C-alpha cells in the first residue's frame, strides 16, 4: 500500500491522489451514479407538479394529450432508444480496441440526438403557430380547462429535457475527440462509460415523459 | 512514526507555492477549505452587520432608524446571506474540506478539480445574490414565498439565479464527499472506525445531494413564473402557491440538517478529544446522523401548519417532527455521558462544547414546542420562531463551527491563538447570545410578529435588552475574529497534536504538508481509543507507516 510499490505499475492516467486505477475507476462510477440520483430529484419537482394538477384537472390533461402530435412523439421515442443502442455499441467497440468503429457509433449517437432535437423543434413550431404557448401566453382553442397550465408543464418538462440532450451532445463530441486523441482507451474507459450513463439517463427521462404527456388516458 | 522525524522538512501546504493564482486555481483541498473560510467569514461579517442595524432599528418601538422598505431589504439580505452563503457552506466546505481527507488518511478528495469548481460556482452564485441587492428592492425574505415573489418588480430573478447556482456548488461538494468517504478510506479504516465527523458529513452530503436539486427546480420554476408566466404557482392560471411552499420546504427543511449535522460531528470530535474519553455510544451517534437525515427529510410540512394544507398531513408532519427529537436526544445524552468521569480540559473548544450543549438544548426543545399543532398556530410567524431558529442555527450550527475552528486552527495554520482570551471570549459570546435571543421567546409568545419594523410599546424593554445583547455579541465575535487572525499570523508555533487527538489529521505536520502524509497512514483501532481508567495502559491504535 505504500507509494513506491504501486508507482512502478501505475499508468500515467491514474491521478496522483488515487491508490490504483481500480480506485479511480470506481470513484468515477460512483460519482456518476450519485449525479444521476440528483438529476432524477431535479426532474421530480416537475413530475410532482404534473401529478398534482392532473389530479385536479383530469379533463384538461386528456384534451392536452390529444393536442400533442403522437406520431412525432413516437418517432422521437424510437430515435432516442436507438441512440442508446448506438451509445452502448460505441462503448463496447472502445473496450475491444476498435477505435474507429467506436467513434463512428458516437457520431451516430450524435446524429440521432440532433434528429431528436430537430423533430422537437418542428413540434414546438407547430404549437407556437396554433397559439399554444405556456401559461399566461396560451391563446390556443383546442384544449379545454387550464390549458395554459398543462402546456406550461409540457414546455418546462420537454424544454429541460432538451437542454439535457444538448449538454449530452456536447459531452459526446468531447468524448469522441478524447478517444481520437488516445486519451480515452479500452483500459481507461470510465469517461466513456460515465457519459454513456448520462446519455441513458436522458433517454430514460424521455421514456417517462412520452407516456405522461402524449399517451395519458 | 519515528522515521517521519528524520526526513528533511517538506514545505507545508501554505508555503508550497506562492502568488494569488496558486490559491485561486489550486486543487488542494486544504487551500480550498481556507478560501471558503475567508469567503464565508467576509459574508458572515456582512450578514452580521445587517443584523446589527436591524436590531438597532428595533431598539425603539417606533420605526425611526431606517424606512420600512430598507428594513425589508435588510432582513431579506441578512437571511439569504446567512443561510445560503454562510451556514450551509461553512461547516462542510470549510472544516469538511480541510479535515475530511486528512481524517480518512487520503491525499485529497476524490475529485479535486470538481472541488475547485464548487468554490468558483459558489463565488459566482454569491456575486449574483449580491447583485440583486444592488439592482433594486429585493425584499421577499429568504423564503421567496409566492405570490409576492412572482408579482413584485424587484430583481428577484437575479437572486433566484444566484440561489440556483449556489445549489450546484452544494450538490457537487456533497457528491465529492460521499465518493471520497466510500472510496478513499485508509487501509484498516472500516466504517465503524471512522471519526464521527465523517459520519455526520456523510449524512450531510446525502441531504445536499438529494434535497438541493428540488430547490433548484423550485427556483427555476419561480424564474419561469416571473418571466413567461408558466402558471404552476399562479392561482389565476390554475396553479397553487401552496405547491411552492411544499417544494421550497422539501429542500429548506432538510437544509437545516445540512447546517446542523456537521455541527453534531464537530461536537462529537471535540467532546471526546477534550475530555480524553472514548466517546459514549459511538454507533448510536453515527447512525442517529443517518436517521436524522432520513426522518428530517419527511417533516417539511411543519412549516405549513397555518397554510391550509390537509389537517391529516399536518398531524403526520407533527408526529414525524416529534420523532426527530429521538435521534437528536441520543446524540446529546451520548455527549453528556462522554463527559462523565472524563478528564475534562477547560480549553476553548471545550468551552464551545458547553456553549453548544446549553444553547442547542434550548433551541431543540423549543423546536418540539413549535412542532405541536395547537401551539404552532399561536406561535407561527412570531418572534418565538425567530428565537428558536437562531438558537438552533447560531447557537447550534455557528457555535459548533466556531468551536471547530478553535479545535483545528493550530492544524490549519500551524500556530496557536491566545487560549485564555479565547475561553473568556466564549463566555462573553454565551452571555450576549442569550441576552439577544432569549427575550425574543418572551415577546414572541406574547404575540410580537416577526419581520415588522415597528411594534407596540409594551415590548420595548425586552427588545432593548436584545439590541444591547446583539451589539455585545457582535463585539465578542469581532474579538474572536481578531485573536484568531492574530494567532494564525503571530501565535506561537503549534505542535502536531496539541490536544492529544487520536484521529489521523493529528498524525501529520501542523500545518500539513502538501500531500497530507509522508506515506500512506494505516489504521488499526478506533478514533477515540482513550484509556478508560488508570489501570489500563494507553493503547496507541493508530499509527503511520512510511
Image (spheres, coloured by chain):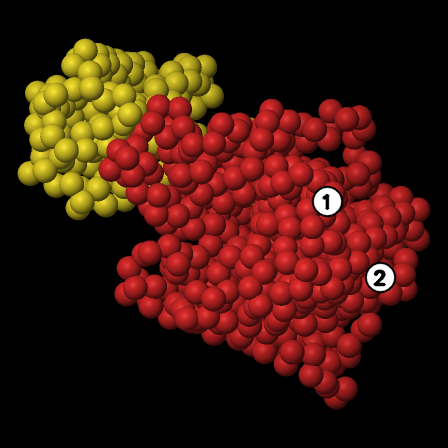
Chain colours: A yellow, B red
In the image, residue B7 sits, relative to residue A172, either above or below, namely below
What residue is rendered at 43% in x and 24% in y?
A184
Assign the N terminus of chain B to one quadrant of the image.
bottom right
Q: Are marks 2 and 1 on the same chain?
A: yes
Q: Which residue is mark 1?
A: B64
> Mark 1: which secondary structure?
loop
Q: Is residue B153 visible?
A: yes
Label 2 and label 1: CA atoms lie apart by 33 Å
Residue B270 relative to residue A129: left or right = right
Q: Nearer the viewer, residue A96 or A76?
A: A76
Image-quadrant location for residue B494? bottom right
Q: How many marks?
A: 2
Q: Is residue B410 above or below residue B435?
A: above
Residue B274 or B14: which is nearer the viewer? B274
Q: Label 2, secondary structure: give it.
A: helix
Between marks 2 and 1 in the image, the one whose residue lies nearer the viewer: 1
- In the rendering, at what x and y percent does residue A111 appear? 25, 13
- Chain hosting mark 2: B
In the rendered structure, find residue B222 and report the number of the disc placed on it: none
Q: How would you rate the neighbour count of disc 1 (Cα within 10 Å): few for under 14, some for 14-19, many for 20 or more?
A: some
The residue carrying mark 2 is: B425
Instruction: Report x, y in % for residue B364.
Output: 56, 69
Q: Residues within 10 Å of mark 2 (few under 14, many from 20)?
A: many
**How far from the left and from the top, in percent, is residue B451?**
58, 50
Please say whether residue B193 is visible from this viewpoint: no
**What residue is rendered at 85% in x and 43% in y?**
B8
Lower position in the chain sequence, tag 2 or tag 1: 1
Percent coordinates x, y for residue A85 in the rendering: 20, 26
Chain letter for the residue marked with disc 1 in the picture: B
Q: Is residue B3 above or below residue B274?
A: above
Identify which residue is drawn at 73% across, 54% down. Answer: B60
Amino acid at each position: 500500500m505504500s507509494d513506491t510499490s504501486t508507482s512502478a505499475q501505475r499508468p500515467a492516467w491514474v491521478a496522483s491522489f488515487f491508490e490504483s486505477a481500480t480506485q479511480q475507476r470506481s470513484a468515477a462510477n460512483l460519482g456518476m451514479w450519485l449525479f444521476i440520483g440528483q438529476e432524477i430529484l431535479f426532474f421530480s419537482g416537475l413530475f410532482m407538479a404534473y401529478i398534482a394538477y392532473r389530479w385536479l384537472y383530469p379533463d384538461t390533461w386528456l384534451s392536452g394529450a390529444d393536442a400533442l402530435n403522437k406520431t412525432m412523439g413516437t418517432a422521437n421515442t424510437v430515435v432516442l432508444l436507438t441512440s442508446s443502442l448506438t451509445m452502448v455499441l460505441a462503448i463496447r467497440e472502445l473496450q475491444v480496441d476498435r477505435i474507429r468503429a467506436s467513434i463512428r457509433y458516437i457520431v451516430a449517437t450524435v446524429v440521432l440526438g440532433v434528429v431528436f432535437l430537430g423533430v422537437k423543434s418542428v413540434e414546438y413550431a407547430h404549437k407556437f403557430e396554433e397559439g399554444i404557448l405556456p401559461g399566461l401566453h396560451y391563446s390556443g382553442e383546442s384544449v379545454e380547462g387550464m390549458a395554459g397550465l398543462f402546456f406550461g408543464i409540457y414546455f418546462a418538462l420537454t424544454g429541460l429535457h432538451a437542454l439535457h440532450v444538448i449538454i449530452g451532445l456536447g459531452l459526446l463530441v468531447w468524448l469522441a475527440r478524447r478517444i481520437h486523441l488516445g486519451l480515452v482507451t479500452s483500459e481507461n474507459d470510465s469517461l466513456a462509460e460515465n457519459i454513456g450513463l448520462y446519455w441513458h439517463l436522458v433517454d430514460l427521462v424521455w421514456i417517462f415523459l412520452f407516456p405522461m404527456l402524449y399517451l395519458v388516458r | 512514526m519515528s522515521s517521519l522525524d528524520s526526513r528533511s522538512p517538506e514545505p507545508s501546504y501554505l508555503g508550497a507555492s506562492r502568488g494569488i493564482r496558486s490559491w485561486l486555481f489550486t486543487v488542494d483541498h486544504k487551500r480550498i477549505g481556507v478560501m471558503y473560510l475567508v469567503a464565508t467569514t467576509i459574508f458572515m461579517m456582512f450578514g452580521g452587520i445587517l443584523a446589527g442595524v436591524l436590531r438597532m432599528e428595533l431598539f425603539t418601538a417606533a420605526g425611526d432608524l431606517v424606512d420600512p422598505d430598507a428594513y425589508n431589504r435588510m432582513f431579506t439580505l441578512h437571511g439569504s446571506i446567512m443561510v445560503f452563503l454562510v451556514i450551509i457552506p461553512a461547516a462542510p466546505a470549510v472544516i469538511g474540506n480541510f479535515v475530511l481527507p486528512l481524517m480518512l488518511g487520503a491525499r485529497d478528495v476524490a475529485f479535486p478539480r470538481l472541488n475547485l469548481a464548487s468554490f468558483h460556482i459558489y463565488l459566482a452564485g454569491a456575486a449574483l445574490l449580491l447583485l440583486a441587492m444592488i439592482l433594486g428592492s429585493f425584499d421577499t425574505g429568504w423564503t421567496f414565498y409566492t405570490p409576492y415573489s412572482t408579482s413584485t418588480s424587484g430583481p428577484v430573478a437575479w437572486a433566484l439565479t444566484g440561489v440556483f447556482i449556489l445549489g450546484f456548488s452544494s450538490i457537487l461538494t456533497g457528491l465529492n464527499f460521499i465518493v471520497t468517504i466510500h472510496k478513499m478510506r485508509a487501509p484498516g479504516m472500516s466504517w465503524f472506525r471512522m471519526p464521527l465527523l465523517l459520519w455526520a458529513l456523510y449524512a450531510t452530503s446525502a441531504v445536499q445531494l438529494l434535497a438541493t436539486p428540488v430547490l433548484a427546480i423550485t427556483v427555476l420554476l419561480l424564474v419561469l413564473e416571473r418571466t413567461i408566466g408558466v402558471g404552476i404557482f399562479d392561482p389565476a392560471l390554475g396553479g397553487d402557491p401552496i405547491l411552492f411552499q411544499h417544494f421550497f420546504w422539501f429542500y429548506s427543511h432538510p437544509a437545516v440538517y445540512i447546517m446542523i449535522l456537521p455541527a453534531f460531528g464537530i461536537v462529537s470530535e471535540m467532546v471526546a478529544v477534550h475530555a480524553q474519553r472514548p466517546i459514549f455510544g459511538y454507533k448510536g451517534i453515527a447512525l442517529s446522523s443517518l436517521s436524522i437525515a432520513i426522518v428530517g427529510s419527511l417533516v417539511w410540512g411543519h412549516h405549513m401548519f397555518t397554510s391550509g394544507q390537509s389537517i391529516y398531513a399536518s398531524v403526520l408532519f407533527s408526529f414525524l417532527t416529534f420523532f426527530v427529537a429521538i435521534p437528536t436526544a441520543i446524540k446529546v445524552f451520548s455527549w453528556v455521558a462522554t463527559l462523565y468521569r472524563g478528564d475534562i480540559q477547560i480549553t476553548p473548544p471545550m468551552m464551545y462544547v458547553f456553549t453548544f450543549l446549553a444553547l442547542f438544548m434550548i433551541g431543540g426543545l423549543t423546536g418540539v414546542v413549535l412542532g405541536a399543532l395547537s401551539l404552532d398556530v399561536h406561535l407561527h410567524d412570531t418572534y418565538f420562531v425567530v428565537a428558536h431558529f437562531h438558537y438552533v442555527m447560531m447557537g447550534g450550527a455557528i457555535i459548533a463551527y466556531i468551536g471547530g475552528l478553535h479545535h483545528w486552527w493550530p492544524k490549519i495554520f500551524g500556530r496557536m491563538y491566545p487560549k485564555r482570551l479565547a475561553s473568556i471570549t466564549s463566555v462573553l459570546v454565551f452571555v450576549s447570545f442569550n441576552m439577544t435571543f432569549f427575550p425574543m421567546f418572551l415577546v414572541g409568545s406574547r404575540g410580537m410578529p416577526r419581520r415588522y419594523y415597528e411594534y407596540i410599546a409594551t415590548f420595548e424593554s425586552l427588545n432593548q435588552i436584545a439590541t444591547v445583547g446583539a451589539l455585545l455579541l457582535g463585539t465578542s465575535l469581532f474579538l474572536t475574529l481578531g485573536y484568531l487572525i492574530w494567532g494564525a499570523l503571530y501565535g506561537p508555533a503549534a505542535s502536531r497534536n496539541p490536544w492529544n487527538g487520536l484521529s489521523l489529521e493529528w498524525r501529520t505536520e501542523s500545518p500539513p504538508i502538501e500531500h497530507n502524509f509522508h506515506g500512506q497512514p494505516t489504521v488499526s483501532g478506533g478514533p477515540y481509543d482513550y484509556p478508560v481508567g488508570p489501570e489500563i495502559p494507553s493503547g496507541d491504535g493508530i499509527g503511520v507507516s512510511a
